[in-house]
Image (spheres, coloured by chain):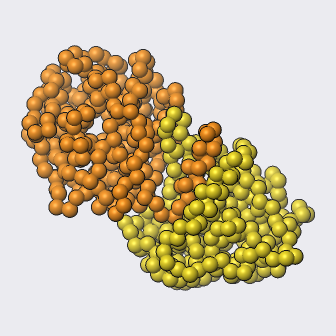
Chain colours: A orange, B yellow
Amino acid sequence: MNPIFRFALAVALAIPLTSRSQDMPLTQVLIEGEDWEVVAEGYGFTDGLCTDAEGNLYFSDVKDGTAVYKVDLEGKVSEFIQDAAGISGLQWGADGKLYACVARGRIVVSFDKDGKMTQLADEVRPNDLVVTHDGNLYFTMTPTSEIRRIDPEGKMTVVSSGDVTKPNGISLSPDQGTLAVSDHGGKFVWAFRIKKDGTLDAAQPYMPMRTPVADPEVAKGDGMATDIHGRWYVTTAMGLQMFDPTGRMGGVIAKPQDANLVSVCFAGPDHAWLYVGCGDKVYRRKTKTKGALFFQAPRATEKPPRD
Amino acid sequence: MRISTTRWGIAALVALLGLAGSAFSQDDYKPGPDAERKDGVPQGKVTQHIWESEIFPGTVRDYWVYVPAQYDGSKPAAVMVFFDGGGFVNEKGHSRVPIVFDNLIHAGEMPVTIGIFINPGVVPPDREGAEPRKNRSFEYDTLSDQNARFLLEEILPEVGKSYKLTENPDARATCGNSSGGIAAFTVAWERPDAFRKVVSHIGSFTNIRGGHVYEALIRKEDPKPLRVFLQDGENDLDNLHGNWPLANKQMAAALEFSGYDYKFVMGTGGHSARHGGAILPDTLRWLWRDWKELEL
C-alpha cells in the first residue's frame, strides 16, 4: 500500500466515538489491594530509574550518590557502577551499553559491560534521556529549553529549542515514532514526531498535566515512562499522572510519600511493576500492564484488554 | 495544500460503513424521510480533499465540501462545519447530511448552505513501521481558539477560493458529536464574531481536557449571541471524564439561566450518533428558522 492509502485507513479508524485506545481509567493499570512498597531507602535524592531486559532496576542518587545502584529480581540492592556521582538519567541501549546524563559533571556518557566510561558530550546541561533501538540518544537540557540528540555516529545536534519551557522527562511511544517530553516549568507533556533522519517536528502540547491549585501553571513534569498499550506516565508535583495514547489524562496515582517524585520506570518480573524514585526512597507497585522497552525493536501499540 | 486521491476515499468509506453498523447502545432512532432521496429534489455535489495544517503542525486530514444545486455563485452561501465530518457526509451513515441539506434547502427551510465536513487530524508517522499520532482529542477537547483559527485561517479561506462564503456569523454554524460536539461549541464560544450557531450531539462537556467548566463559565459571563442546540441520551457515558447526561443537563440549565437562545433534547440512547442523526432535519429547521431575515 502507498503511504497515503495506509494513512487514510488510520484516519477512518480513528473516528469511533468510543474506543479501546482512549478513555482509560486507572483501574486498567492498578490492582486493588496493591500499594507502594519500599525497594531501597537511605538515599539523598533517588533518580534515573531504568531497567534491562531481565527486569533488574538501576537508579542513581543525584544528591549524595557515588554509584549506579542495582536492584535485582530478588530485591537485593548493590552498587552496579562505582565512582559515578551526580547522575540524573540512565537508560540501556540496544548495544548493551548503559547511557547516563551526568548532571553535575555536565556530560553525557556511556558505560560498557566492564563499567568503562566513555564521554559522549561535554559542556552540556543534561537532565534525562531516552535511547531508541536504532541508537539515537535524545536528552533534555532543562535550563536551556533544549532537546538534543546524539546520533549513532556520536554527532550531537539540537533537535528542539524553545518548544518546552523546562524539558525534563523523556520517553517514546512503543513504535518509537513519537517522542514525548515533560515540562518542569509548564503544564504540558509535549509530543514530537521522530523523522527518518532522527530530527523532530510536529511539536504539540499534547497532554495537559494536572497542576497544584496554588501553582496552576506549573505541573513540575519530571521523569517519564510508557507502557505496551501506549499509555504515558509522568511524575509531577501532584503525583504520577497517566495519559492514554490520545493524550487524555487517565488519572493521578498518589505519591508514595510527601517528597519529590521525579523518576518512573517499569521493571521487575515481566516489567509489570511501576518503580518510582521519591525522595530518599525507591518504591514499586504491581500493575496490570507492562513497560515498553526501547532497547528492544519498536512494536505496535497493543490494545488493552477489555474491562 | 491540496492533494487528491481516489483510493483514499474508497478506503475511508469502507471503514466508515463498517462503523455505521456498530451501534453502541440499544435504541430505535433511525434516519427519517427527510434523510431519503426524493424525486424532483436537485442534488448537491460533494467533493473530497486532503488538508495539511500548519495551525495543527504536522497533521493531515480528509475533508469534504458539499455544494447545493441551488448555489450559483451570484451571492454568498451560508456555511455549516461538521467535525468528524466523514461520518456526517456519508449518505448511508447516521445523519446523511447531503440528502437532508438537499431536501431542506429545496423546501426553503434552510438557506443555500455550503457544508464542510472535516475529519480530525493525524500526524502521520515518518519512520518505517510507526503509527500515526491521533490528534482528535487535542483538537476537539481542548478549550482554546486553536480549532476556530484552524477554520478561519486555513479551511474557510481554502474553500472560499472556490465558493462565496458568507461573512455573517449568524449564518455560520458548527456541528459535531461527542468531542466534536464540544468542539462545535468551543469554536462559537471562542469566536462568536465568526460562528453563532451550534449543534452538539452527545457533547463531551466533561473533564476530558477541562470541558466541564463551560456550564460555570456560561453563567458568569456576558451572554454571547449564540444559538445552541444540545442533544443527549439518558444512557450516555458515565466514566472517568464525567457523566454525559448530567453534564449536558448542566449545560442546558446554564444556557437557560443566562438567557441563551437554545434547545435541549434528551433521549434514551447511549453514546451513539443515532438519535442526533435521526432528529437532525428538525434540528436544522429550528437552527435556521429565521434564515430569511439574515443577510448572507
Taking B197 as reference, is A97 above or below it?
Answer: above
The percent coordinates of residue A235 (x first, y second) are: 29, 47
Apparent side of residue B54 relative to residue B182 in the rendered image (left or right):
right
From the image, which quarter does the N terminus of chain A lie in? top right
Apparent side of residue A32 relative to residue B153 in the rendered image (left or right):
left
Taking B85 as reference, is A127 above or below it?
Answer: above
Quadrant housing residue A173: top left
Apparent side of residue B281 relative to residue A307 in the rendered image (left or right):
right
Taking B21 as reference, is A92 above or below it?
Answer: above
Apparent side of residue B25 relative to residue A79 in the rendered image (left or right):
right
Quadrant housing residue B44: bottom right
From the image, which quarter does the C terminus of chain A lie in? bottom left
Which residue: 64% across, 61% down? Answer: B85
Which residue: 35% across, 19% down? Answer: A121
Q: How many marks?
A: 0
The percent coordinates of residue A215 (x first, y second) are: 34, 55
Taking B20 as reference, is B50 above or below it?
Answer: above
Which residue: 87% across, 76% down? Answer: B40
| Residue B55 visible in the current orientation | no
Residue sitting nearer the eye, A22 or A221:
A22
The percent coordinates of residue A164 (x first, y second) are: 44, 40
Quadrant housing residue B193: bottom right
| Residue B235 visible in the current orientation | yes
Residue sitting nearer the eye, B211 or A243:
A243
Which residue: 20% across, 42% down? Answer: A269
The percent coordinates of residue A155 (x first, y second) are: 43, 18
Residue sitting nearer the eye, A180 or A96:
A96
